[in-house]
Amino acid sequence: MTADVLAVPPTIDDIAEALKSGKLYCSDTIRDALKVFVRLDNCEHFNFGPLTLDTVREAQHEAIDFVQHGHFVLPYAVCMYSSRIKYDNCDVGTALINVNKTGVFDAGLFDGNAVIRIIRANDAMFAMHCICTNKTQLQREGRAIQIEIREHELKYWEPLLPSASETQWQLTEGALCMLGMTMIVNTKGIYKERLPYPSKPNQKRMQQGRPLLPQTTRIYTNVYNRAVEKGEKGTHASPRPHRRRAHIRHYPATEKHEAYIRPVEAMLINWDGKPLDPRKEYKVK
C-alpha cells in the first residue's frame, strides 16, 4: 500500500469491509462496538481538510479550560471526524469515532467522551480506544485533561507495542485529536458545507445490507490553516486575517450579580465563514 493510500482516512465502508475480512486489528470489545457503529443511522460525519498535528494540538490545548469549566461538548452524541493529519515524518489518514456518555457504546459506564481512532497500515487497519474524561488535573507542566485507558485495551495492545510509553501514546492520541478537532469545528468563521442527506443511496444500501451513509459536513481547513500561520501582525485599526484563540472569560461579582464565567469560541478574524446549520432529523424506512 502506497503512502498516498495510507493518508486517506478510512470510511465507514472501509471499516465494515475490514471487519468482514478480519483485517481490522482491535480488542474484542471494540470489534463488537464497531459492528454496532456501522449499522447506526444517527451518526454525523465531519470531513476535515488536511491538518498538521501542531495545528490540532494548539486547538487541543485550548479545550482544557472548556473541559475544566464544563463547557466542552461534542457536536452530536455520535459523530465521526475524518482528516489527513500531517505528522513529522508522514501523513496519516485518521478516522475518529466520538461518542458522548449518552451514545451507544458503554452507555452510562463512563463520564466524558469515548473515542475510537482508526488508521491504515499496509493492507490492514488498527482501531484503538480511550475515554477523554470530563476531569482536569494540575501537573508540573500545567493543567491537563485526564484520559482513561480501559483494561481490555491494555491487555490487547501491550504485547504488540514495543514499550509502555508507546502503548500510552498510541492509545491516547485519538482523544487528543478529538479535543482539537472539536474546537476547530466550533471556530466562528470557519467555512462549513452541510451536504444533502443521502436518503436514496441509503434506501438501496439498506436493501443490500451495507452500512448507511451518514449526514456529512465538510470543514474547509484551507483558510483555518492560513489563519494559524505565524506572520507579521497588521495595525490595530486593520489587523491581518488571523485566528483569535478560544478561552474562558471570567466576570467578577458585582452588586447586581454573582461572579460567573462564559466560554468564548475561537474565531477567524477578517475571514468570511458560515456557522453550522441546525440538525434535521431523518428516518430511513
Image: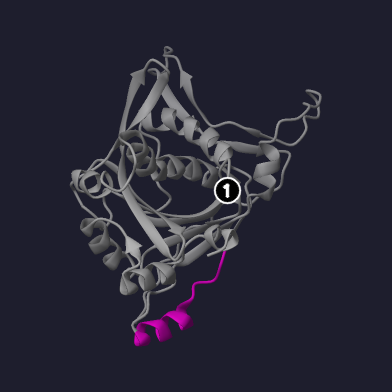
Q: Residue at x 38, y 73 (%)?
A: 17
Q: How many numbered dots are placed on residues in this image?
A: 1
Helix, strand or loop at mark 1: loop
- Residue 123 lies, with reference to residue 152, above or below; the image says below
Question: Residue 214 appears at what percent x and percent y?
Answer: 44, 68
Tell whether 190 sits left or right of 278. right
User: Does residue 77 show up?
Assistant: no
**Residue 37 drawn in magenta:** no
Task: State the residue in front, 258 or 277.
Answer: 277
Question: Residue 203 appears at what percent x and percent y?
Answer: 41, 84
Question: Residue 146 appears at what percent x and percent y?
Answer: 31, 31
Task: State the residue in front, 44 or 171.
Answer: 171
Tell whether 31 sits left or right of 18. left
**Residue 195 drawn in magenta:** yes
Q: Quadrant of residue 89?
A: top right
Q: Residue at x 46, y 20 (%)?
A: 250
Q: Which residues are magenta?
A: 194-208
- Count neighbours of disc 1 (C-alpha within 10 A) and say few if under 14, some if 14 to 19, many if 20 or more: few
List the residue tagged with mark 1: 90
Query: What residue type is disc 1 on?
Result: Cys
User: Does residue 194 show up?
Assistant: yes
- Residue 181 lies, with reference to residue 9, above or below; the image says above
Question: Residue 78 appears at what percent x and percent y?
Answer: 36, 56
- Quarter of the image that includes the C terminus: bottom left
